[in-house]
Amino acid sequence: MEELFIGWLKEYGYVILFLWAILEGEMGLIMGGIMSHTGDMEYFMTVFIAGLGGFAGDQIYFYIGRFNKGFIQRKLHTQRRKFAIAHLLLKKYGWPIIFVQRYMYGLRTVIPMSIGITKYSGKKFAIINLLSAWVWAAITITPAYLYGEEILTLLAFAKAHWYFALPIAGGFLYGIYTYFHKLERYFLQKRNGRFS
């Protein structure tokens, strides 16, 4: 199965990377960086395609917000805290929040949708989003391209010693989740304090 997956990556690498980037996957970009390192993909084309995928994904979310406000309010009511945070961030920081939202775990899909709900210019969003997507792709792919050999060695070790790797990976993911949950609470408290 692993060999089949690697074969698909080598044959359809750019298509898989584009689709993976639409679904906001840093893992796909890291894989693209490693494959650029091994020579199975070309570095600049990998950054270009990944950026286009990230751009397309956020444009989809933006237009879901723009044309489906009622649907979002009905179906995503459990996410209303995140929408409140997204609106607060947009109000406070303006366009730079579009640039950095890709690095905000838990808010990456919510921010473009919440911007789409507002009267923010679709053209301005698209320009900032495209530049942001290419920067995001370069920042994520370049270290994997430069340190591909070390990453492959680490992956081989993790595969051979999964009983060490799993708890470490789980602890790391839990730490990220906890940090962003605290950040979310901080912004909500700040917002509630402003309106109380």
Image (spheres, grey):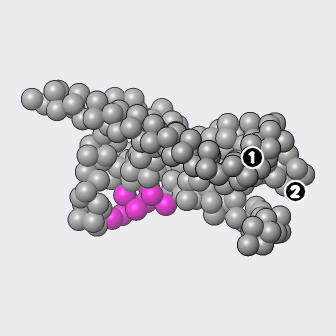
| Snapshot quadrant of residue 41 | bottom right
Q: CA distance from mark 2 to mark 1?
A: 22 Å
Q: Which residue is mark 2?
A: 40
Residue placed most toward the observer, 41 or 130: 41
Residue 87 is marked as none
- Residue 131: image x %, image y %? 62, 41
- Residue 170: image x %, image y %? 51, 46
Highlighted range, magenta: 60-69
Circle 2: residue type: Asp
| Snapshot quadrant of residue 93 | top left
Residue placed most toward the observer, 162 or 153: 162
Looking at the rendered image, the disc whose residue lies closer to the viewer, 2 or 1, is 1
Going 27% across and 35% down the picture, which residue do you hit? 185
Mark 1 closeness class: few <14, some 14–19, many ≥20 residues within 10 Å: few
- Residue 146: image x %, image y %? 81, 36
Asked if residue 61 is among those painted magenta in the image, a careful observer would answer yes
| Snapshot quadrant of residue 19 | bottom right
Q: Secondary structure at mark 2?
A: loop
- Residue 72: image x %, image y %? 30, 62
Image vertical order of residue 117 relative to residue 75, above or below: above
Q: Secondary structure at mark 1?
A: helix
**Left or right of residue 106: residue 41:** right
- Magenta: main secondary structure equals helix
Circle 1: residue type: Phe
Sequence-first tag of 2 and 1: 2
Going 49% across and 60% down the picture, which residue do you hit? 60
Mark 2 closeness class: few <14, some 14–19, many ≥20 residues within 10 Å: some
Asked if residue 123 is among those painted magenta in the image, a careful observer would answer no
Residue placed most toward the observer, 67 or 43: 43
Going 62% across and 45% down the picture, which residue do you hit? 164
Q: Which residue is mark 1?
A: 157
